[in-house]
Image (cartoon, grey):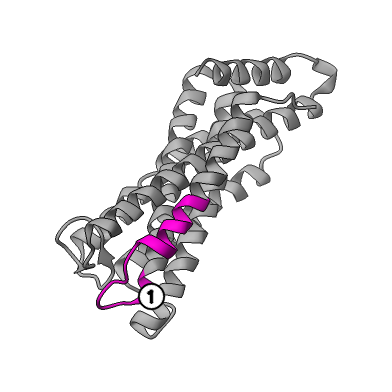
Amino acid sequence: MLSKNKWLSVLSVLAVLAVLGALALVIFYAPLELTMGLPQKIFYFHVSSAWLGMVSFFVAAIGGILYLARGKEVYDSLSLAGVELGLLFSVLGTVTGMLWARPVWNTYWTWDPRLTTMTIMGFTYLGYLLLRRAIDSPTRAARLGAIYAIVGFVSVPLTFFSARLLRTIHPTIFGNTGEKMVMTSPMYQTMAASIVAFTLLFVVLLWHRVRLEMAQRMLESEPEEGTAKHQVAKFDARGEEQ
């Protein structure tokens, strides 16, 4: 059974409050964009979700590198959690993007470079989960998964720079390429608050998911009492120190 971690509990409450605060800013503080009107407000959550999807895959790649270097299960759990959260946030980013696109582009979907590369990225990491399920040996699955997470990260910068390097109708918030979205200072402040709130939520979900994965491995290897349990304790100890 997982022991309660007070810092994780505090951080979880702060994450919920931060997301609610960001939602309040989106509704009551951020003004309407001149061209897109009300649907533009979806972008505060769309950008945050899409960005954290990429950050999650970066965390997965780092976890893969650390696992190959040190061979500790906690790093494999970190990599797995990064991929799962990356897919979750990528789906949220895609769905919110489609909800925005319908009134603005008059269609839910178009094979724009950004949307196309986002789809490729999503299916790339879906393959990661399928690969792990297809391998019976946990050690071999972890090793191949680590390599896959590292190599698969190539799709992330391709997705990020697609709206800047290729001809696209996807609007950009920062930079001068693509269709520029007109934003005022309150809009940028709301965007920053939304990104911070979602980042805090991501950290909480990542922490919970790693602890849950380590606890599951501990139960599966119950006869060997110690390794996974010891690593969960060490992981929590590091959290207490931060």
Choose between 173 and 75: the one closer to the eye.
173
Horizontal and vertical percent position of residue 137: 69, 33
Q: For this view, does 196 lie left or right of residue 157?
A: right
178 is higher (above) or lower (below) than 72: below
What residue is drawn where x is 22% and y is 61%? 184
Asked if residue 99 lies left or right of residue 110, the reply is right
Q: Quadrant of residue 205?
A: top right
Pick the residue in front: 184 or 94: 184
Which residue is rendered at x = 21% and y = 67% of the image?
Answer: 182
Q: With 128 as the anchor, is 121 left or right in this view?
A: left
Of 3 and 56, nearer the camera is: 3
Q: Residues within 10 Å of mark 1 (few under 14, many from 20)?
A: some
**For mark 1, what is the residue?**
38
Dominant SS type (magenta): helix
> Of the residues shown, which amino acid type is indicated by label 1?
Leu
Can you tell which quarter of the image residue 152 is in? Answer: top left
Range covered by the magenta-colored residues? 20-40
Give the residue furthest to the left: 176
Above or below: residue 28 compared with residue 190? below
Residue 130: x and y, percent? 61, 50
Q: How many marks?
A: 1
Dot 1 falls on a residue whose secondary structure is helix
| Vertical position of residue 98 compared to residue 80: above or below | below
Q: Position of residue 57 (x, y in %)?
A: 45, 43
Residue 77 seen in this snapshot: no
- Decide: is 124 above or below 35: above
User: Residue 132 appears at what percent x and percent y?
Assistant: 62, 42
